[in-house]
Amino acid sequence: MIKIGGTVKRFKRIYIYAALLGPLAAAASGQEWYAGAIGGFGYAPSLTVTSPSGSANTGLSNSYALGAYLGEEMYNRWGGEVRYLYRQSDLKLESGGTSVHFAGHNNLINGDFLYHFRPRESTVRPFIAFGAGMEFLTGTGAESASQPLGKFAALTNTRETLPAGDVGAGVKANFRKSWQFRAEVRDYISPAPHKVIAAAPGTSLTGWLNDIIVTGSIGYRW
Amino acid sequence: MIPELFRKIALKKMRAGFVTVLPVLLSLPAAAATFGTVVVIGGHASDIALDEQRSRLYIANFAGRRIDVMSTTDNTLRTPISMTTVGESGSLALSPDGRYLLVTNYADCPATTPGPCTSLTSSATPQLTILDLQANLRTVFPIPQPATATTTPRVPLAVEFGAGSQALLLTSSAIFLVDPQSASFVQLPNPQVTVTSTALPVPFADFPPQILQASSGVSGDGQTIFVLAQGTQPQAATGTTPATPGNQLLLSYNIPSGFISAISITSAPALGPRVVSANFDGSAVLAGWSLLSQYGLVAQFPYPTGVLNLGGHAWDYSRNLIYAQVPTGGPGDPPVLHVLDSDNLTVRERIQLPENLGGRSVLSSDLNTLYAISDSGVTVLPVGSLASAHRVSTREEQVLFQATSCDNSSIAGTLNVADLSGGHTDFTLSVPTGTKGVTFSQLSGTTPAQIAIHVDPTAFHTLTGTAVVPVTIQSDGSIGIPNTVRLLINTKDPDQRGLIHNLPGTIVDLAADPSRGRVYALRQDRNQVLVMDGRTFGPLASLRTGNTPTKMAFTRDGHFMIVGNDNSQIANVYDLDTLQPSQPIVFPGGHYPHSIAVSNSTMFAIVRNAGAPAGLIDQIDFANRVATQLDTLGIYINNVPPDSILAASPSGNSIFTAMSNGTVLLYDDTYGAFEASRKDLTSLAGAYAAISDDFFMAGGQLFNRSLVPIGGLPNTSAASSILISGNTFVTVNADSPPAPGVVERVSTASALRHIRSIEAPEAKGILATPAVGQIGQTILPFLQTMAPSNNGGVLYLSISGFTELPAGFDQPLPVPIIRRLVNSADGGTVAPGSLITITGSGLAPTTDSAQGLPLPKALGEICATANNVALPLIQVSSDQIDAQLPYEVTGAANLVIDAPGGKSAAFHFTAPATAVAVFQSGQAGDFSGLPLIYRAINNQLVDFTNPIHPDDTLFIIATGLGQTSPAAVSGAAAPSDPIEAALALPTVTLGSAALDVQAAGLVPGMVGIYQINAVVPHSIPSGSQVALNIQQNTTSKTFMVRVVNP
């Protein structure tokens, strides 16, 4: 836990530096910078663990997400941003009416390109986004020798780093002079975990982990 | 000289109004500790009254003609109240508001010779003194002449207040209600009583209870006043119909209703001590030595002397206890306070008193202090702090030592001596002079103490049975009297069959309940039915009986159990489905039910009769729970010896009666008639049974349906018991204890098979022991001590408790054959100290498991040796034995099993010094067969869902790590301080990383089980299948485990 917390702190430090440097850069170039805070809800379709005796569903439980972003609109319709999300994501394992839940969370950090369908001066600006980054998936629950469905997979108190791509779309709405509201949906796509969710010997856990997160955010432009 | 000198000083001080407290005297000679403080008054107290408002105890000093006043603050005497009346101060009563103290004077009832007070002199005036303690006024009132009495004297005998404002006054000829405020005397018209007392003068050394012969008491709620007096013939409440004549009278006056009742009681001996105590609501009363309730006499002290002036009692209704001294009249008969259960007078403890009690006792309102009239005046007993007083006792009632043919080394046992208060008190142990072969780690000491007892089996080897060695415990510092502990030492030959179950106490009856999987044993000395599991014989419940239970019986539908009692005039009834008491069966006055039999349509009971004849047969109306005496037994006189026995046939069509004088009697339930009786023998005793409707047995004699003796069962002595088993019977005999018993399966004519049992069955001569205080003991000459066990075998009461014979106990047994010997952890090599598993056939005739530590060296009727060293045994069965290989056995060795079927051939094996083996019996979630490797962080087994992490501490449970330092003792629980560490420390690796092995040794409290503590390094590789290796000397074991880093 201490190490995980340390990771979060490091990310926050990066954003603090970016926030300090951003206005200076914007003032120098005349380009528009923006930053904001995010709140949302994540939904992750289950993965399947298969064994000769049956199968089980596993993955992340649906839950909230919090985060922040910092971006720059370098061109009239193109922009780029760095985006961080803390996703509360308990681990789950379900089969035949039996389900196991294990405390956990996910830290996502991505760099994205944004294409806006309307120019910068428009009040409402639909956009699409795509990018790549990393997921830091952590199981924090208490391990048990008698975890149910252990013949399929073990939910483990450890952490695992996964590459993650993301795609999404949304809309920005400017109001007042410098404020902006955003609503969007992103799909974070990563390989199936093998350490935090470990497939038992003789079973297989393959495929891609999709974490679809719907967010709303308030941002400030300068 | 010192007591005499003290007495003079004491009297002198008392006259001056100073304090005299006896413990000063008692501290002079070296004597056992006693409970209570004696306050010497000089003279003899006849009654006491407690004034808690003023912290005083008023003591009627009978011959001294005064009221002594004792401060309850410091138990010292203050200025007495002089009486101005002519007569003696007989009885006291304090009004509930504390204002009025009423004092009776014993009038002036002269007689030329000692005898009942039958007339008063013309000048005599019986009087009642009313002391107004608030106004400090004294008024003396003459007691009115009863309306109906003429010459009968009106001597006041007892006066008592309840919660009301009026006192109940009993005189020799009338009962009055006295209102002290108005000084009015209202005579109660009914009942009319005639109460006697002793006329004065009396011979020397006569005391107030012998003169007044009356005493009163009040229920805890103050609503009922009881008076026990010597009455000759009270009249019924109507005043027209004479009640049953009696020699004593128990009055009960209910204050709210104003109803008064009189019960006439005939008793022999008299109801002494002449004291009456009641429970809280007045529904039960202890009058002298008899405990009465709505069901009549529910219990009595078993050995009353009837002496009126010796003893006393009080009812502690908050603790459901009775504190009583009721002398037994035994040798010496020291003053002993019995602490008894208030429902059946079961003796819980016996406490030494400084002197005899002698009359009324009064408890303080908080029930913590008891003030009791005693020889010297008053004894103050802080009963509320009794639990913190020094009382030496032992945890064990008896200790069983069983020798085996495999081991001649001494047998160890433990006796725990403790002070029930938790204090440190001296004690000494002693055994009868000449006892050999028994040694104690200490014969004296201070509590708490754990005494190690060692028995040399060679000193008892020739017995091939069970010897009883009593251990007497004494303590100068203990106020409690410790009970004697029995050491039971059993030696046997391999052919002797049976498993002994250690069950202390006087067990007088045994019954099986196969449908409920239970066994019932009747423990007479504790007044209870022990309910045990029919397979494990573990306790399930205990049922409280009357006093001194004698026999059990069951209703035909098996729904109820009925228990007869020798010191209660009721038979207890229990619902066996709920194991709760049901309404008891009430017997006629003076009838104590001993033996009960249930036929298809009726129930009979043999009763001991307090009158004549000494024994009777009563018929029980079970629906109404009442018994009535049969006028005749058909054509026969209803007169049987009280120690006779009843037995119903299995069909319920017959009830057979066997009598100790040789008479037999048969009741035919189909015709409802006692149809046959004969007396062809001079005596009968021992086993009895109604085998069928056509055959009956008593004392080894078989009788046909006409009760003609048709022969005797072979080898069946008077001390045997019989169990019907199909078409044959099983009998057990006690040849001459402590020699073993002989168990036989017989037909009606001949013995089919017989074997020797491990110990002798119970018999009257064994069960009967010297009486202990007021603990009842009634051992009937007819015994039924066998019962079928749930596993098809037989149980019989025996010296140590009961003996279990397995199914087919008399079948020929095979010689044991050993096929394999492995360690119990992973089935591999064995080493000294390893837990081992032996497999084969015919290894043991029965299945059994050790019940505790140290492990026994004989179990399930077998023992085993390796290189002639006996193996501590864990569990045995016909095809497997689990045991420990003794630490002494190393290298090439031979294993031999000694069973009732014979000795096995030697099994050769080799035991290296160490052979580490991790137990693989773990089970968690979806996984089984897991090695017993635990993560300390969550104390759970390592498995796929509970992987090893960096810095984890692992606990590895194994056997076979060999000898330790300090050296371990085979079969004994390993100590916790110091830890017995393995001489050779194992190494543990995880993948390529070496773990830090911090300790490896025996698990404290366990036998042959080791624990290895190892710490995982911080840097280890992750993997789902990483090799965990444990190596000690040349043996190594590897397990694949999951490792997660971090």
Image: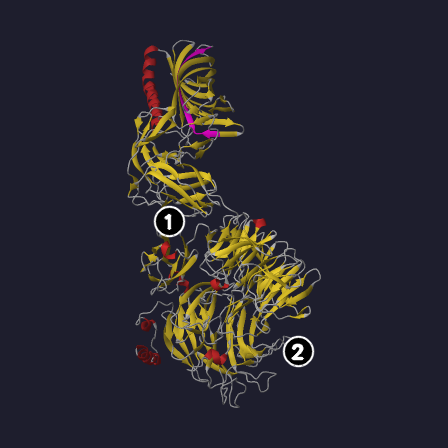
Q: Amino acid at mark 2?
A: Thr
In the rendered view, tell whether residue B287 sits above or below residue A168: below
Residue at mark 2: B240
What label sits on residue A204 in the rendered view?
A: none
* Residue count near mark 1 (Cα–Cα under 10 Å), binned few <14, some 14–19, many ≥20: some
Q: Nearer the viewer, residue B406 or B649?
A: B406
Instruction: Please name the residue that numbered disc 1 is placed on.
Output: B407
Q: Please give the name of the residue rendered at 40% of the width and 80% of the height, measured from the top-left corner.
A: B43
Relative depth, front residue between B431 and B301:
B431
Q: On what subunit does the disc labeled 1 rest?
A: B
Relative to A135, is B884 above or below?
below
- The quadrant in which residue B398 appears is bottom left
The amino acid on which the numbered mark 1 sits, given as a three-letter code, is Asp
Q: Residues within 10 Å of mark 2 (few under 14, many from 20)?
A: few
x, y (%) of residue B722? 56, 57
Report the front residue among B179 and B30. Answer: B30
- The image quadrant that residue B149 belongs to is bottom right
| Between marks 2 and 1 in the image, the one whose residue lies nearer the viewer | 1
**Residue B500: image location, x then y, percent:** 46, 52
> Residue A33: where, in percent of width, then height?
38, 15
The percent position of residue B314, horizontal first and vertical second, equals 47, 68
Start-end of magenta stretch = A100-116
Describe residue A210's horizontal placement relative to residue B625 as left or right.
left
Do residues under tags 2 and 1 come within 8 Å of each other at their CB atoms?
A: no
Does residue B178 show up? no
Q: Is residue B571 visible?
A: yes
